[in-house]
Every structure is written in structure tokens, then in C-alpha cells.
Image (cartoon, helix red, strand yellow):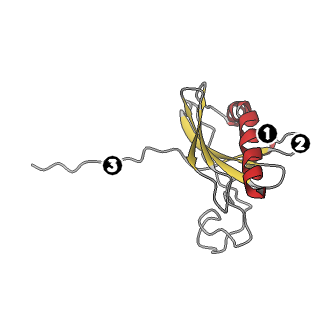
């Protein structure tokens, strides 16, 4: 008797920006990004993360999880509007480049969180811990572009 394997996705739900416009009304905005829209369009900004100098995080993964998430995806927007992706997971407190800068973003970074994420507040707290290093990476990207 051949038993068929069952497959279950090993992922976390997405948090979509329901106000984001889509280039195709049959698709969510992140799948049909308008030509003038930045990368990560269709995913919401976490306004509580906005700093006085204009940095702000956004989330791709839904942070609200009663049992806590140990990984997810987010992004950061610099004061100049440029963006970088963030892959976070509970583990060692390190930052690694997952995807180098390209024409759409100044990279995708993999960062270690100290604890599981249960809600938006917890996500913002841990993302903010990485802001000084992300700011440094942004400055390096800007310097490379201008040389």
C-alpha cells in the first residue's frame, strides 16, 4: 500500500496592506505592484516604529501569534525612501547579508532575534535593536553608489 505524503506549508501568514493599490484588480498589491511603487509595496508600515529622523519598519509576516513566531519577514524604509528587506529568526544575535543590494533595495539582511514574536509591539522592539547596524549598512550603500 503506497501512502501519499501529506504536505503542510511551513510558513507564517502574511499581513497585507489593504489600502495598497494593485496593477491588477484580481491580484493583491504585492503580486501586482504598480510601476511607480517601491519594493515591498502591498505590505504595511509599522507606524509605531517610525523614528524622529524618519526611519520606519514594515512587516510582511503577520506578527500577531499567541504561541509566538520564531521567524518572519519584514523591511526597513530609510528617511530617503530607499528600502531593505529583513529576514528575522530567533537565534544568535548576528546580521548577515542574504541578498546584496540591487536596483530596487539596499539589500536583504538576515538578523537574529533574542525571543519569539507574539505581537506587533514585540516585533518593533526587536527590529529597533537592529536599527543602528541597518543605518550603518545604509550609509555604506549610499557611499558605494556615490563613488
Q: Where does label 1 land, which residue? A: 49
The relative height of residue 79 versus residue 136 in the rendered view (above or below) is below
User: N-terminal of the two: label 2 or label 3?
Assistant: 3
| Of the two numbered discs 2 and 3 in the rendering, the one whose residue sits closer to the viewer | 2
Question: Crowding near pointer 1: few (<14 within 10 Å), some, many (20+)?
Answer: many
Report the residue at 53% width, 27% height from top.
91
Residue 83, given in percent of the width and then of the height, sits at 72, 53
Question: Crowding near pointer 2: few (<14 within 10 Å), some, many (20+)?
Answer: few
Which mark identifies residue 7? 3
**Seen in the image, is 53 located left or right of residue 109?**
right
Residue 29, given in percent of the width and then of the height, sits at 65, 65
User: N-terminal of the two: label 1 or label 3?
Assistant: 3
| Quarter of the image where one finds residue 112 | top right
**Seen in the image, is 53 located left or right of residue 96?**
right
Label 2 vs label 1: CA separation? 11 Å
Contact? badges 1 and 3 (CB < 8 Å): no
Contact? badges 2 and 3 (CB < 8 Å): no
Report the residue at 54% width, 37% height from top.
71
Give SS at disc 1. Answer: helix
Report the residue at 62% width, 69% height from top.
32
| Quarter of the image where one finds residue 92 | top right
Q: Is residue 96 visible?
A: yes
Residue 135, given in percent of the width and then of the height, sits at 76, 40
**Number of callouts:** 3
Which mark identifies residue 53? 2
The relative height of residue 43 versus residue 56 in the rendered view (above or below) is below
Of the pair 103 and 92, the residue shown nearer to us: 103
Give SS at disc 3. Answer: loop
Give SS at disc 2. Answer: loop
Amino acid at each position: 500500500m503506497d501512502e501519499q505524503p501529506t504536505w503542510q506549508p511551513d510558513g507564517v501568514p502574511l499581513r497585507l496592506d489593504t489600502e495598497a493599490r494593485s496593477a491588477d484588480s484580481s491580484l493583491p498589491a504585492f503580486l501586482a505592484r504598480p510601476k511607480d511603487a517601491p519594493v515591498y509595496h502591498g505590505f504595511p508600515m509599522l507606524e509605531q516604529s517610525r523614528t524622529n529622523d524618519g526611519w520606519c519598519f514594515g512587516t510582511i509576516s503577520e506578527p500577531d501569534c499567541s504561541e509566538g513566531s520564531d521567524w518572519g519577514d519584514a523591511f526597513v524604509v530609510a528617511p530617503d525612501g530607499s528600502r531593505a528587506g529583513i529576514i528575522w529568526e530567533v537565534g544568535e544575535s548576528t546580521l548577515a547579508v542574504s541578498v546584496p543590494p540591487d536596483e530596487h533595495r539596499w539589500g536583504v539582511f538576515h538578523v537574529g532575534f533574542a525571543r519569539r514574536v507574539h505581537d506587533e509591539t514585540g516585533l518593533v522592539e526587536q527590529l529597533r535593536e537592529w536599527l543602528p547596524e541597518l543605518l550603518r549598512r545604509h550609509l555604506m550603500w549610499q557611499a558605494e553608489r556615490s563613488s
